[in-house]
Amino acid sequence: MFLIQFASPGFLWALPAILLPVLIHLFHFRRFRKVLFSNVAFLQQLSDQSRRQSRLRHLLVLAARILAVASLVLAFSRPYLPAAHAPVDARGNAVGIWVDNSFSMDALGTAGRLLDEAKDRARRIAGIYQPSDRFLLLTNDLEGRHQRFVSREEFLRMLEEVPLSPRIQTLGGIMERQSILFGELGQEAGKSYYISDFQKSTLRVDEARPDTSLTSFLVPLPAQQADNVFIDSCWFDAPVRLPGQTVSLHVALRQDGGQALSGQPVRLFIDGVQRTVASYDLEPGGRTEVVLSWTLSGPGTHQAWVEVVDYPVTFDDRLFFSFRVTQEVPVLAIEQPPGSPYLRALFGPDTTFRFLSVPAFAADLSSLPRHHLVVLQGLQQLSPGLAQALGTYVDQGGSLAVFPGGEADLDSYNAFLSDMGMRGYGSPDTVPTRVTLINERHALFRDVFEELPERADLPAVSRHYRLEGGGGSTGEELLGLMNGRSFLSVQEYGRGRVYLSAVPISQDHSNFQDHPVFVPALVNMALMSSGLEPLYHVLGSAAPILLRQPLEGPGVVYAIRGDDSEMIPGQRRLGNQVQLMVRDQLYRAGNYGLHAGDTAIMGLSFNYDRRESLLDPHSPAELAGAGLDAGLQGMGIIDGRAEDFGISLEALQTGRQLWRLFLWMALAFLLAEVLLLRLLR
């Protein structure tokens, strides 16, 4: 319980001024003299009643004037209820202030941009402390120059330089960093402030745990409008892109809040030139998908972006991406001599593919990553070296098609498949059967058939190896047999995939190689294997960029170059691949190029994290504890709105101010005096 204290107690000497209305009333009371009338009883009664009413009115007016003067004197003495402060270190206050400078702070607040409002609030917080106190400024960038306590003057200078940033931090992470820095200072007590729009999608407020040794306050800044249209993602229909091919790019659009939109444009730019435009409609809080189609030009790497027009949050109005138009798809067949004429007939004459067939004993295992598809055909046994190389190849993004030999050593195959978590081959089944199921939902056969007849003539099988069907450990079934087993299945492993066939490519086992289904199956395996490079990466992500075909030789250093920048990412060789770690070294979204010296390797595109595009904030009630974890309920909440922030800040520094209350009381007593004089006549 706090006693009332006074900021200007000298004004209390004016309290004797309450005697003035008393003296005035003493000298202005009317003295009544008796007037003798004839014996009229009701006049005597009326006179007594009027005297009592007059005396009551004068006493009420006197009380109102006394209380008005007293309230006015107390208002000038600035009474307040002192706040409960943490103990102050002998060296003065230590104050930590986090200013959220994420992209969501680019939205409009009640008095301008939220980031500008946040700087203003931080500036005013620093102003209630002494110039000799120590201040800590933290932003989402967590710059080294910020992670130290400085004077108020230097704090204000650094505060003016805080820009918008693509970096995303959680509230718990910021609290932990502040706690560490206060601990390094050796400060026994301190105050910390967190100024933000408190976005639900990124801050993860419910997971935050404040340091109980610090007096902490949350300063929420409400946005004027919480709506934003942004490009969420994009992808191609086909995994491989060839010159002269008409391709379709799917663009996913979202709106966070806002109003219904109709006929808004979305534009596609390739190599800096606008290629096509489409329109979209969006409901409030809705999603939609726009398809942009165009004809590809020559082979090579192309860099592009799609864009919409939206205000005021604009960082997510563009999505950058890079794609490669492939001149030819390299396919390697590792075969049992003399090899299969069917694979040569399929891939050899087609200039879309660069086909190479080698016997198993002569295969260059180090060259596997240079091929998009590797076909094992007719091998009777898998050597440990070949099995290990193939496992690494698939794990790093390669595609492998397995057609076992007619008299295969199934133990060697099953050991290889078991290492990848797949169920292997069972004993041969010599009962004739046929294919009765084609999985048209899978990309391998999607859009291959206009309409598949109910009793289609599908491949006949005279003998086969048993493969478990369905979506168990063997993955997804592509072709199924009449007996319920799989004829062809696919399994994801690492970044690649393995296609398992129940038969070799041989007339002794089936007529699959002679059937029309054989062509789209093998061709699509090769085409789908070339779409391994992502269209874009997310800034700040810890996921590495993988190079499947790195340059050989000592001293190869890769660099990422933009229009006016260059940086060298972290580099680590892993088997036949190179991992590039960008992390926080890039700040700006856009299209870049990967180079090794003067040699251009590939195009790279980086985009801002779309989690920042969801602007829905935590309400003050949620921040106060409603619906959140109990860890934040002990923290103070300071209203960040401009009209209330000064009052809240003053109350924080000196306690709850009462002078406004006494001023209103003085006005109320004066009004009561007027009403008494007018109404009680």
Image (spheres, rainbow, N blue to C red):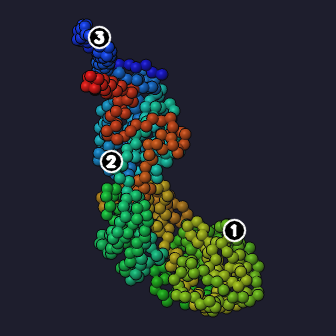
Q: Secondary structure at mark 3?
A: loop
Q: Label 2 is placed on what type of residue? A: Gly
Residue pointed to by mark 1: 418
Contact check, label 3 and label 1, Cβ < 8 Å: no
**x then y, percent, for residue 514:** 61, 92
Going from N to C along the chain, the mark reached first, 1 or 2, is 2
Taking the spot 49% from the left edge, 59% from the top edge, the residue there is 544
Of residues 258 and 318, the one nearer the viewer is 258
Instruction: Classify 10 Å Cα crowding around label 3: few (below 14), some (14-19), many (20 and above).
Output: few
Residue pointed to by mark 3: 39
Instruction: Classify 10 Å Cα crowding around label 2: few (below 14), some (14-19), many (20 and above).
Output: many
Q: Which image quadrant is residue 647 in?
A: top left
- Image height of 73 relative to 358, above or below: above
Residue pointed to by mark 2: 109
Of residues 217 and 438, the one nearer the viewer is 217
Q: Label 3 is placed on what type of residue? A: Asn
Residues under labels 2 and 3: Cα distance? 81 Å
Contact check, label 2 and label 3, Cβ < 8 Å: no
Instruction: Classify 10 Å Cα crowding around label 1: few (below 14), some (14-19), many (20 and above).
Output: few
Taking the spot 34% from the left edge, 41% from the top edge, the residue there is 641
Of residues 412 and 542, the one nearer the viewer is 542
